[in-house]
């Protein structure tokens, strides 16, 4: 089964899909090994893994190179963060065609102006509704695979207010979005209103420390959210683990004091399937 079809089937199912955020091939493989049906490739995670902030600093080719490697080493559907589509509607056309070619199962495009910034940072700016509708129309035209999931995100809550975000989302749904993503709701009340007002399938971004309160998945499912992404937790966990390891090495000269917290040599090689390559 095609990965696009796998994702579409999951999103059409009875359960809300949880997609942890990967930022490289190793983290994506760990998501799959943990039993998750879908991986979300966070644009912010890709940028931060390269040492840059989430401000649209990685270019299209850099992002595609990383995405292609992740898709190559995983068997589950991958949803990609396409930021603004990497430019205007012409760039969106190329983005969608390329994502489809390299095996991405779905992606989201947002209505921020370029250069974009992390959805949970302040001082964002938006393109007009008309410009975004052009992008959606072109994205739909670019698609050859009808099972590819096109997710459209609006960052309007912080810029124009909650009501505007709902209005934008409804316009994007009419233009052909398969799923809607209203970024950074500030309260359970806003989350409930999104659930009530938006009838198109919905995605919500859930992670500790952002502007959105963390709500149990069971409650989100009741409110009609079909996809929950948790973009940054794995990367933040790895940062803390690396800092702890480095502190031990700096203090003691080696990592013996925390060796029980480290994956073994064999565990690491199993994750990346070294034996399969050596048996060829």
Image: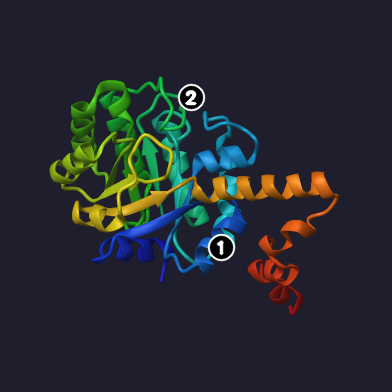
84, 45: nearer the viewer: 45
For the C terminus, the quadrant is bottom right
- Residue ID for mark 1: 30
Q: How is the image coloured?
A: rainbow
Q: Which residue is mark 2?
A: 115
Relative side of 207 to 239, left or right: left
Residue 11, placed above or below residue 116 = below
Can residue 70 be seen in the rendering of this structure? yes
- In this rendering, the label closer to the viewer, 1 or 2: 1
Q: Residue furthest right?
A: 253
Q: Residue at x 46, y 47 (%)?
A: 231
Task: State which tag comes first along the sequence, 1 or 2.
Answer: 1
Residue 206 picture location, percent across and down = 37, 46
Q: Is residue 160 above or below residue 107?
A: above
Residue 267 occupies which quadrant of the picture? bottom right
| Percent of width and height locating residue 203 | 31, 48
- Does 258 appear above or below 231? below
Query: Would you identify the image quadrant in which residue 167 lies?
Result: top left
Q: How many marks?
A: 2
Residue closer to the observer: 209 or 46: 209
Q: Nearer the viewer, residue 144 or 81?
A: 81
Q: Looking at the image, which residue is at 42% across and 28% down?
A: 88
Q: Left or right: where does residue 257 sit relative to residue 132?
A: right
Q: Position of residue 35 (x, y in %)?
A: 46, 69
Quarter where residue 250 is shown:
top right
Q: Position of residue 87 (x, y in %)?
A: 46, 29
Q: Residue at x 24, y 44 (%)?
A: 176
């Amino acid at each position: 089964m095609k990965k696009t079809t796998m994702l579409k089937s999951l999103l059409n199912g009875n359960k809300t899909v949880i997609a942890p955020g990967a930022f490289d091939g190793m983290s994506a493989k760990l998501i799959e090994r943990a039993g998750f049906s879908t991986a979300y490739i966070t644009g912010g995670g890709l940028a931060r893994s390269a040492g840059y902030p989430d401000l649209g600093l990685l270019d299209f080719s850099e992002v595609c190179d990383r995405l292609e490697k992740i898709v190559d080493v995983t068997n589950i559907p991958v949803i990609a963060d396409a930021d603004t589509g990497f430019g205007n509607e012409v760039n969106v056309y190329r983005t969608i065609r390329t994502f489809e070619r390299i095996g991405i199962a779905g992606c989201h495009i947002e209505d921020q102006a370029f250069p974009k910034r992390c959805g949970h940072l302040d001082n964002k700016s938006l393109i007009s509704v008309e410009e975004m509708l052009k992008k959606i129309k072109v994205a739909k035209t670019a698609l050859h695979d009808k099972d590819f999931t096109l997710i459209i995100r609006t960052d309007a809550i912080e810029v124009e207010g909650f009501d505007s975000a709902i209005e934008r989302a409804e316009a994007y749904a009419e233009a052909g979005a398969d799923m809607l993503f209203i970024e950074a709701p500030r309260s359970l009340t806003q989350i409930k209103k999104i659930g009530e007002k938006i009838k198109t399938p919905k995605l919500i971004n859930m992670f500790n420390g952002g502007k959105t309160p963390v709500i149990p998945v069971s409650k989100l499912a009741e409110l009609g959210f079909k996809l929950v992404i948790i973009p940054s937790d794995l990367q933040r966990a790895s940062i803390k683990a690396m800092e702890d390891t480095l502190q031990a090495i700096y203090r003691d000269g080696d990592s013996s004091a925390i060796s029980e917290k480290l994956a073994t040599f064999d565990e690491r090689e199993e994750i990346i399937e070294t034996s399969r390559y050596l048996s060829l």
